[in-house]
Image (cartoon, grey):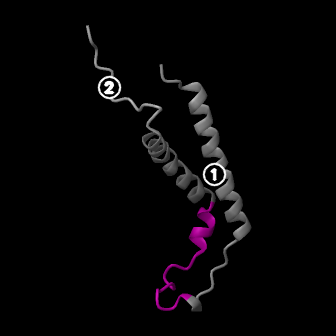
Amino acid sequence: MSFYKGKCIRAKDKYLVHRSVAKVLLPGFLILVVALNIGQIWAVPWQKLHLQQVNTVTVDINVRYLVVTVISSGLVCGLLAYAYLHLCKDT
């Protein structure tokens, strides 16, 4: 008897593996970055921003905090990928 096992991603198809991992981890990464920077996003005067007058409105953005949150979000996503690799083995 032959049972249908579903569509499997073979490890030898590296492009498909990388694309699948990116589709899973990218939304989590973006959610983490936005969640950690929500205070700075809310502080931006969105009504005063226009494409023609970008230089006239000054926005106070803490660049160090932005860099730290992007790095920490990347580390969290990397940790999740590592945990998924070792805990959810495909049998």
Task: Please identify the dominant SS of the magenta region.
Answer: loop
Q: Which residue is mark 2?
A: 6
**Image x and y of residue 57, in percent:** 58, 88
Q: Nearer the viewer, mark 1 or mark 2?
A: 2
Q: Quadrant of the N terminus?
A: top left
What segment carries the magenta color? 37-54
58 within the magenta span:
no
Q: Helix, strand or loop at disc 2?
A: loop
Q: Quadrant of residue 42?
A: bottom right
Furthest-left residue in view?
A: 1
Read off the residue under disc 1: 73
Please state which of residues 38 and 6 is positioned toward the viewer in this rendering. 6
Which residue type carries mark 1? Ser
Q: Earlier in the sequence, mark 1 or mark 2?
A: 2
Q: Residue at x 62, y 65 (%)?
A: 39
Image point (62%, 43%), residue name: 78
Between 38 and 29, the one lying in front of the other is: 29
C-alpha span from label 1 to label 2? 32 Å
Residue 79 locus on image (x, y percent) = 64, 39
Whole-percent x and y of residue 24?
47, 43
Give the residue type that dot 2 points to. Answer: Gly
Quarter of the image for residue 77 reads top right
Give above or below for 30 relative to 83: below
